[in-house]
Image (cartoon, coloured by chain):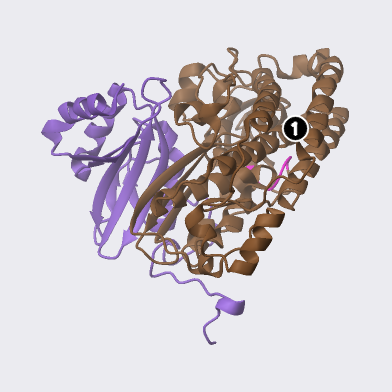
Chain colours: A brown, B purple
Amino acid sequence: MKEPEERELELLIGPQHPASGHMRLIARIDGDIVTELKPDIGYVHRSVEKIAETKKFLQIIPLVERPSLPDTTANNLAYVMALEKLLGIEPPPRAKYLRVLLAEITRIHSHLYGLGIHGVMIGSSTAYMWCFGDREPFLQLAQELTGARLTYSYIIPGGVRRDMPSGFPERVEKALRYMEGRMKDYFDLYFNNPVTRARLEGVGVLKREDAIRLGAVGPNLRASGVPYDVRKAEPYAAYPEVEFDVITEKEGDSFARVMVRVKEIGESIKIIRQVLKRIPEGPILHESYEKLIPPKLREQYKSTGVVKFPSLFANLKAPEGEAVARVEGGRGEVVFHIISDGKTSPYRLRMVTPSFRNVILFEHLTKGARVADIPAIYGSLDYFPPEADR
Amino acid sequence: MRMDELRQRIEGELKDLGAKIEAKEPNIINIIIQRDNAVEAARRLSSIGFDHVKAVTAVDRGKEFEVIYIVSSYSEDISYFLVKLRISLSHDDLRTPSLVDIWPSALYQEHEEHEMMGIYFEGHPRMGKKLLLPESYEGIPPLRKEFKIKTEGIDHEGA
């Protein structure tokens, strides 16, 4: 019998939704073993950086939110923080607490989204249904606070758009207690399930030094034992005033990445409780911007807690200069770098998202893995193609 | 580590490379470096503990282009600080050495700035290949200022 000329096969996975969103994985396989895998990205590239140069500063808020749909607060906040540095403005204390409140509500539902998608990728449709079901109370809380389920555009230069509605803390507490109660079920059915463990433990191990070298971010980095969290490294908003732990795991495998997300939900619950306890009274928009609101609308803002944009906001000019801001989103660090030439649009806007930082891990973690482990590794990275492509 | 200590340390390390160092913000150090010394500067920054690249921003300023590496560390003692390593390039000669050998975390970002701005990172393994743009795309790198996007609707200025 003649020897086959080549032992390796090329396997194309995607780009029609291999799992979560559009991307293609080009794998070379030898039998059941992956010898090389390259992510082919860009299918959902939407030129955010280019479009930003033609939009006014305020219009860019919804623009930068859209690519990271399950985790919009991080982009909203990081962008506005960079803009505020250029403007030289600080939000009032109450607005800082409200920013943290929404950021942590988002972290919880973003983690549940990631865990759910990962669940269905390794064949547990129950985990998927549960996570997506339990995301709902948090989406509803966010909607009550901001008016939208996902695309909040809640954080604006100098503050936030709306104050908490009455009775909101009680409804938040109800959702938090519900989530805490649910955690036991998750462990019984899913995390401690021998099938889940067998699919994830020891699979896709990211060593500590590789996580650092490759610049991994978020839970993927912390699961390899690196305690880096922007909320601690360069604390922003009200984070200096709340206590929480940076969750790390040692193993660096797919299971460790899942565990970091699960435990971070617990930390977010801790943070939200502190925020609701300590949130100071006061305005939610910087006074110099509040003054720009016409008197009638200002009265309305005072009585309802809902900011009507002063029309001058539309032509907001950022002084000439450069600003960098970073934020710890659900999936990891978001970095915005704005270069302004003093006009109503940025001269250059650089947006680096956690998924774009993590995409390199696909190449690294799949080498030598089994073909069936590709989805287990993919899902454990909580990778979101539109977020990477921007 | 304190800002002034770190600044002194960096100044000492990069003195002989002709680097211009300034710090206006509490946690950001700007380093302007000639492209011929960029690899050596990166190596020395990496030995101080700056272990990863957070962002690579290329800027089109007409006759001049600039590549800015925003570098930081995962070590707790200096993770608060950001270093901006800035390299100026002339529009006629947009080549600069790739820093992926020192910082593999720059692999995808250098690639993106290559296709979007037309900067050639010498030594980068994927130059000339597409990352985010379609394979069939030809023409001006789209993030250059000379590339105009057509707008519609209320922003539209005549046909």
Residue A237 visible in this rendered orientation of the protein: yes
Magenta stretch mostly in which secondary structure? loop
The residue identified by callout 1 is: A112
- Going by the image, does A242 lie left or right of A32? left
Residue A308 visible in this rendered orientation of the protein: no
Chain assignment, label 1: A
Q: Which residues are magenta?
A: A18-24
Tell me what residue is drawn at x 75 percent, y 32 percent.
A112
The reply to whether the magenta stretch includes residue A22 is: yes
Tell me what residue is drawn at x 34 percent, y 27 percent.
B50
- Going by the image, does A116 lie left or right of A10? right
A232 and A167: which one is in front? A167
A374 and A193: which one is in front? A193
Q: Quadrant of the N terminus of chain A?
A: top right
- Residue A26 in picture, x, y percent from top left: 62, 40
Tell me what residue is drawn at x 78 percent, y 32 percent.
A116
Q: Is residue A299 above or below residue A5?
A: below
A221 and B7: which one is in front? B7
